[in-house]
Structures are given as C-alpha cells and as structure tokens.
Amino acid sequence: MGFSKSKKVLTAVTIATALTGAAVLAAPTDFSGTLVAQAATQSIDFSKADAVIAKYNALVEADYTATSWATLKVVEPKTKQFEEMIKQMKALTPSEVSANITENGSTEAEIQAELDLFAKNLNNAIDTLLVKKSEVANINLSGIKAAIARYKALKEADYTPESWAAFKLV
C-alpha cells in the first residue's frame, strides 16, 4: 500500500472513530476520501440558526410596538445575509463546503461559532420585542376601585380625633 493510500485510510479511520450512527453506516468502504468531506459538513450544526431564522420570519409586525419592531428591523440585513449563506452552504457537496471554508481562511469551528453567535444575538433581539396588547390591561381592577371608593367616602366627623390622625398617617 502506497503512502498516499495509507494516509487516506488513516484519515478515514480517524474520522470514522469520531462519528456515530448513520454517518458511520454511510461511510464508504473504499476509503477514497469521501468520508473526510462527509465529516466536514456533519460537524457544522445549522439547527440553532435555522430555528431562530424560522422564528424571525414568522413574526408579524402588527403584533408589536412600532419602536420595538423598528429596533428589530436593524438586524434584518444581517439575518438575510446569514439565511442566504446557510442556504448556499446546504446546497454544496460536502467536499465543496470543506474547500470553501479552507479557501476563505476559516475553520469549521470558527464557522460554527459564528453561526451560534448569530443565533444567540437574533434570539436576544427577538426577545426585546414588545407586544402591543399588554396582559396588564386584562387585570380585574374592581376590588381596587371599590377600596378607593370606600376611602373617599370616609368622613372625619365619624371618627375620634386620635383615630383620624392615625388613619391620615397611613
């Protein structure tokens, strides 16, 4: 076995030991290097970014205050940029993804960290949205209104000077 074939086998075996489940079952038996490319795309997890982009795209402007919506819209260009980047990465073959990452001078770990940071920041931006209809408006205030009415109905003449003075302190 030549040096280059030995290197491919060693690389494939090393990667295969780090993979589990369907990835190992799908591993090529000829160790042609395909496994290396498959491992490259499997190490990038788009799930957090996909989830927050879906959450962002499902938002309805009419449900939120104008100010909070305007603040959220500041991140729209970056969100669309990431959405397009993810779409493009998913359309590539595993070897193309790996080549593009390397060509751009990045590592898979850096790409993953960037995706995770984007997801976290967009989630934080979404969490700052203020809903137009506040739950406070649905509170039953009849008890408080009745207590205020009783307070206003009190007359100083109905009480001793000492008790009225103590009442006024409260």
Image (cartoon, rainbow, N blue to C red):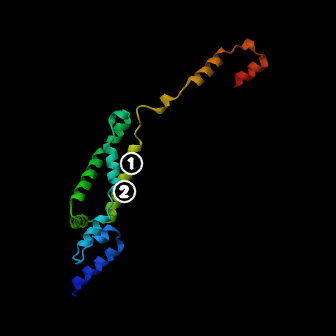
Q: Amino acid at mark 1?
A: Asn
Numbered disc total: 2
Drawn side of residue 44 relative to residue 143, left or right: left
Q: Secondary structure at mark 2?
A: helix
User: Disc 1 and disc 2: Cα gap in Å?
Assistant: 11 Å
Q: Residues within 10 Å of mark 1 (few under 14, many from 20)?
A: some
Tell me: residue 166, above or below residue 84: above
Residue at image point 21% right, 76% down: 32
Q: Which quadrant, please, contains the C terminus?
A: top right
Residue at image point 78% right, 16% down: 161
Q: Which quadrant, please, contains the N terminus?
A: bottom left
Decide which of 142, 4 is in the foreground and name it: 142
Q: Residue 68 is drawn in which quadrant?
A: top left
Drawn side of residue 18 relative to residue 153, left or right: left
- Outermost residue, top direction? 157
Q: Residues within 10 Å of mark 2 (few under 14, many from 20)?
A: some
- Disc 1 target residue: 123
The numbered disc on residue 156 is none
Residue at image point 34% right, 71% down: 19
Q: Secondary structure at mark 1?
A: helix
- Percent across and percent down for residue 33 are 23, 75
Q: Residue 106 is drawn in which quadrant?
A: bottom left
- Percent across and percent down for residue 130 are 41, 37
Choose the circle earlier in sequence order: 1 or 2: 2
- Percent across and percent down for residue 60 are 33, 37
- Outermost residue, bottom direction? 1
Tell me: residue 64, above or below residue 28: above
- Disc 2 target residue: 116
Q: Amino acid at mark 2?
A: Asp
- Percent across and percent down for residue 44 are 31, 62
